[in-house]
Image (cartoon, rainbow, N blue to C red):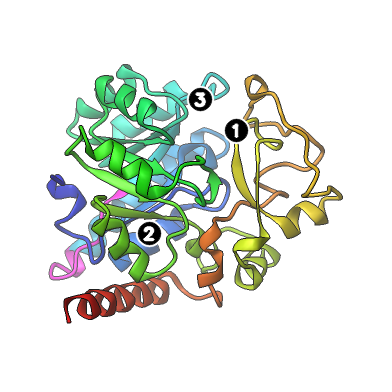
């Protein structure tokens, strides 16, 4: 069952995934105002003192929006915390989330009870992203409120499992909030995620190609020109397997068909394995990229997803 924060103010059952480097207040605010959960990684605020400024801006502007539009309140926002030893900012960034009572925290790359307890201390919820059933079990045992099943085809760091298999295995024992990530770029995909057992869709790639996204124009253009065959799955750039645009790998002087394997123990979010830095030069994207045809405002993208979602539901009901 979904808690009220994940359904009451939403136009669509969608959480916009936090995009490393790309997500910032302008994008997050546009997502929330359009009626989906907006999110950004805490590490995108650099230096770390900027996170305080960003959270103040977002909370104040959303409060002002709700006061001016009581009949159409904004959706809540989320902050992604990388719970990994290479993230030296975790304690500071978590303190900022507590200070501003961030409604939703998305934890990645490690399930830590202390992080969950800190968020629960003010009434927030924690969604933890997982790529297999073992990680899912561990996250819930350590106090996470919900799960994000990151299946094959998801942009950025992604698992190898079919969404059908991953959702099925998790739903055998977990009846709490479950989101699905992996190549969801249409309203029909959102409905399909719900049909197979997820509560919500977790969508990233389509939001890269929006006016508000902090991505260079070449990146946005490549998103609109790519298909599923243009996605490369590799762990070379960060030490963890992820999906990337083949064109960006070629532009960085590498052969996307012959990338060596990396040592996962050397993962560092401030450094890259090569001279090209993921995600600055090596661009992440999911296999659902073919659904993105143009760079549009966030409001227009969410409008398209809502229209397609309703059409798909009506088609199935008929």
> Where does the image place residue 259, in percent across and percent down from the top left?
78, 40
Q: Indicate which disc residue 6 carries.
A: none
Q: At x 54% / y 21%, what residue is drawn?
A: 88
Front-most of residues 153 and 26: 153
Mark 1 vs mark 3, CA separation in Å: 20 Å
| Element at label 3 | loop
Mark 2 vs mark 1, CA separation in Å: 30 Å
Q: Which residue is mark 3?
A: 89
Front-most of residues 165 and 282: 165
Q: Is residue 213 visible?
A: no
Given this view, does label 1 or label 3 mark the residue nearer the observer? Answer: 1
**The C terminus, quarter of image:** bottom left
Q: Which residue is mark 1?
A: 240
| Element at label 1 | loop
Residues shaded magenta = 67-77
Q: Is residue 85 left or right of residue 203?
A: right
* Magenta-span inclusion, residue 50: no
- The quarter holding residue 174 reads top left
Task: Please report whichever mark, 1 or 3, sits nearer to the chain's N-terminal start.
Answer: 3
């Amino acid at each position: 069952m979904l808690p009220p924060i994940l359904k009451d103010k939403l136009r669509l059952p969608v959480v916009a995934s936090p995009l490393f480097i790309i997500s910032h207040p302008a994008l997050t605010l546009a997502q929330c105002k359009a009626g989906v959960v907006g999110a950004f990684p805490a590490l995108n605020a650099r230096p770390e003192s900027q996170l305080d400024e960003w959270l103040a801006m977002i909370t104040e502007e959303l409060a002002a929006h709700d006061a001016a539009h009581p009949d159409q309140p904004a959706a809540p926002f989320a902050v992604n915390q990388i719970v990994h030893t290479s993230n030296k900012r975790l304690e500071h960034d978590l303190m900022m989330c507590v200070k501003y009572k961030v409604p939703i925290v998305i934890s990645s790359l490690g399930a830590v009870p202390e992080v969950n307890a800190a968020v629960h201390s003010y009434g927030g919820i924690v969604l933890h992203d997982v790529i297999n059933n073992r990680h899912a079990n561990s996250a819930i045992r350590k106090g996470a409120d919900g799960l994000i099943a990151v299946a094959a085809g998801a942009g950025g760091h992604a698992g190898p499992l079919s969404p059908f298999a991953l959702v099925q295995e998790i739903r055998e024992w977990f009846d709490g909030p479950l989101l699905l990530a992996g190549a969801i770029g249409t309203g029909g995909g959102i409905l399909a995620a719900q049909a197979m057992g997820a509560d919500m869709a977790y969508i990233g790639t389509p939001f890269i190609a929006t006016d508000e996204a902090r991505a260079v124009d070449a990146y946005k253009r490549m998103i609109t020109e790519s298909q599923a065959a243009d996605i490369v799955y590799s762990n070379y750039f960060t030490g963890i397997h992820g999906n990337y645009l083949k064109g960006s790998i070629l532009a960085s002087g590498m052969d996307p068909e012959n990338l060596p394997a990396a040592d996962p123990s050397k993962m560092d979010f401030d450094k890259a394995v090569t001279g090209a830095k993921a995600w600055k030069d090596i661009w992440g994207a999911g296999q659902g990229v073919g659904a993105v045809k143009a760079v549009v405002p966030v409001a227009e993208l969410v409008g398209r997803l809502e229209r397609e979602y309703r059409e798909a539901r009506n088609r199935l009901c008929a």
